[in-house]
Image (tube, helix red, strand yellow):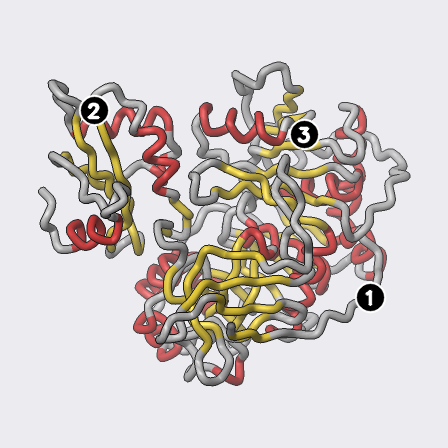
């Protein structure tokens, strides 16, 4: 077992991070998007009114509040209001189908659902409709400020961030304020701190990476420049003109930015974190050669985003690695083979203690990530594979088991397996290999329509292969490695 560890000392502090920052620097810019620009003081006053709106709906500490809002300022206001009120935010992807949304709502059982449009199938749950708008025509911050007696603690659950395990069924990872604080501290220690920092936000706010930027920024007194919908040209412009100093991109975004901007990046740009999937060394080297200070990072929902990040002094030689664990995080390689590759396990104060509705794990226990990796000679983490079956398409996690569960319900399908294949645009694309039921007349068009009715658009397979059978291992399981190889070589019709 190979292990690298970090210091775990910390100190207590106020948990109303926005209120504390606003009291110290009320006129400091915090949020900028196409719809709105707010200082810390202005945002803090609006959050007070959102708290009043939620209190009028009967929201109390521990209640879940689901958000289907667009990744813009209204979601940010709801996030900080939930923290102040002691409610647990449940951020959901607005692109989910009704069926997928219902599955997550049934799991979290929120007292209130906040959405930009009226929704059906909420099974009696309270709905607050907040249309997308720009101030002063917005409606979320229309409440009357009210005193909040709630006093949170490090163990207060801040959100349920839904992710899927090997079963493909969504599970709500319980992230606490304490875990977010540890993650923010660890990130700041490896990235450094500049009072003039500005984060480029391109990641969705229903993903841990996007939310982590909001919390890191308010804790560090930094600004957030948001692109709620990724636009490679605008992202490249911000990185080139000095608007931002920090950014977090997935490999697909990085490639698109580099295709737009060949190498005119601002000297103010301090670090561009690359995560959300394995980035090819050639892409990282191309970015570095173009003058972009890329830093590979490794993490997941269950570690409150970053768990390991490449230090500046180790770039560019260490670009092939994800660096060393953040402050307070332990990483070990369990069950290593002769080549040193084994299971990546993590533990530390920023690792979740469990999923909603499941038994809590001991915080001193190792958390098995399901990923494979090794440590290089310098003690840096090298991620070999991101969960054997996981497909990372355009930065989105696509779980084969979830797609298979849906496609298998088609009356003309006898068997189905989904694997990831290389894709020039998306990094990976889902390919569904389907065995028809006897006498059925499956068509690609029919399968696509069926999948679109039950899955979010990014989960719908980009290729369908109708085959006579699936390759099986000796114990009767689908031989996925063989299937992936056949698909990549084009040996399946």
Give the residue number, with chain letter if any, for mark 1. Answer: 11
Say which mark, if any, is on residue 139. Answer: 3
Spatial separation of the CA atoms under disc 1 and disc 3: 38 Å
Of callouts 1 and 2, the N-terminal one: 1
Camera-nearest residue between 237 and 49: 49
**In this rendering, does residue 333 appear at all?**
yes
Q: Position of residue 209 (x, y in %)?
A: 54, 54
On residue 335, which mark appears? none
* Above/below status of 21 relative to 175: below
Pointers 1 and 2 in contact (C-beta within 8 Å): no
Q: Residue at x 42, y 84 (%)?
A: 317
Give x and y (percent) for residue 301. 55, 51
Q: Which residue is mark 2?
A: 446
Instruction: State the residue at coordinates (53%, 69%).
Output: 332
Please tell me whether mark 2 sits on a helix, a strand or a loop: helix
Residue 337, horizontal then vertical, whole percent: 38, 71
């Amino acid at each position: 077992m190979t292990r690298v560890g970090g210091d775990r000392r910390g100190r207590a502090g106020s948990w109303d991070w926005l209120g504390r920052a606003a009291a110290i620097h009320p006129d400091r810019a915090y949020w900028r998007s196409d719809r709105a620009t707010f200082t810390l003081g202005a945002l803090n006053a609006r959050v007070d009114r959102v708290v009043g709106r939620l209190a009028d709906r009967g929201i109390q500490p521990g209640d879940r509040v689901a958000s289907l809002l667009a990744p813009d300022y209204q979601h940010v206001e709801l996030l900080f209001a939930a923290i102040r009120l002691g409610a647990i935010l449940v951020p959901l992807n607005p692109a989910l189908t009704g069926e997928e949304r219902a599955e997550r709502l049934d799991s979290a059982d929120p007292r209130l659902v906040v959405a930009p449009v009226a929704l059906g199938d909420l099974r009696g749950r309270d709905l607050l409709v907040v249309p997308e708008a720009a101030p002063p025509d917005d409606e979320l911050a229309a409440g009357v400020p009210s005193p909040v007696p709630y006093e949170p603690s490090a163990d207060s659950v801040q959100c349920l961030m839904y992710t899927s395990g090997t079963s493909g069924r969504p599970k709500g990872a319980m992230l606490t304020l304490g875990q977010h604080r540890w993650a923010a501290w660890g990130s700041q220690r490896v990235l450094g701190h500049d009072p003039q920092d500005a984060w480029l936000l391109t990641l969705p706010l229903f993903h841990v990476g996007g939310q982590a930027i909001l919390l890191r920024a308010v804790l560090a007194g930094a600004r957030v420049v948001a692109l709620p919908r990724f636009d490679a040209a605008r992202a490249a412009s911000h990185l080139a003109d000095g608007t931002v100093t920090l950014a977090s991109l997935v490999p697909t975004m990085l490639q698109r930015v580099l295709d737009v901007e060949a190498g005119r990046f601002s000297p103010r740009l301090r670090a561009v974190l690359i995560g959300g999937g394995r980035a090819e060394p050639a892409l990282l080297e191309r970015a570095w050669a173009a003058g972009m200070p890329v830093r590979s990072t490794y993490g997941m929902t269950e570690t409150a985003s970053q768990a390991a990040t490449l230090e500046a002094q180790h770039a560019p030689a260490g670009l092939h690695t994800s660096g060393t664990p953040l402050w307070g995080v332990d990483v070990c390689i369990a069950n290593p083979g002769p080549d040193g590759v084994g299971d990546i396990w993590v533990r530390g104060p920023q690792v979740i203690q469990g999923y909603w509705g499941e038994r809590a794990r001991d915080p001193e226990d190792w958390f098995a990530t399901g990923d494979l990796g090794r440590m290089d000679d310098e003690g840096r983490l090298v991620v070999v594979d991101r969960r054997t079956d996981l497909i990372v398409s355009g930065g989105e996690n696509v779980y084969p088991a979830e797609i298979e569960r849906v496609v298998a319900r088609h009356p003309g399908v006898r068997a189905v397996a989904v694997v990831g294949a290389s894709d020039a645009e998306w990094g990976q694309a889902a390919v569904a290999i389907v065995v028809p039921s006897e006498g059925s007349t499956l068509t690609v068009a029919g399968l696509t329509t069926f999948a679109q009715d039950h899955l979010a658009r990014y989960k719908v397979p980009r290729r369908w292969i109708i085959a006579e059978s699936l390759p099986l291992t000796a114990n009767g399981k689908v031989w996925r490695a063989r299937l992936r190889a056949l698909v990549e070589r084009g040996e399946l019709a």
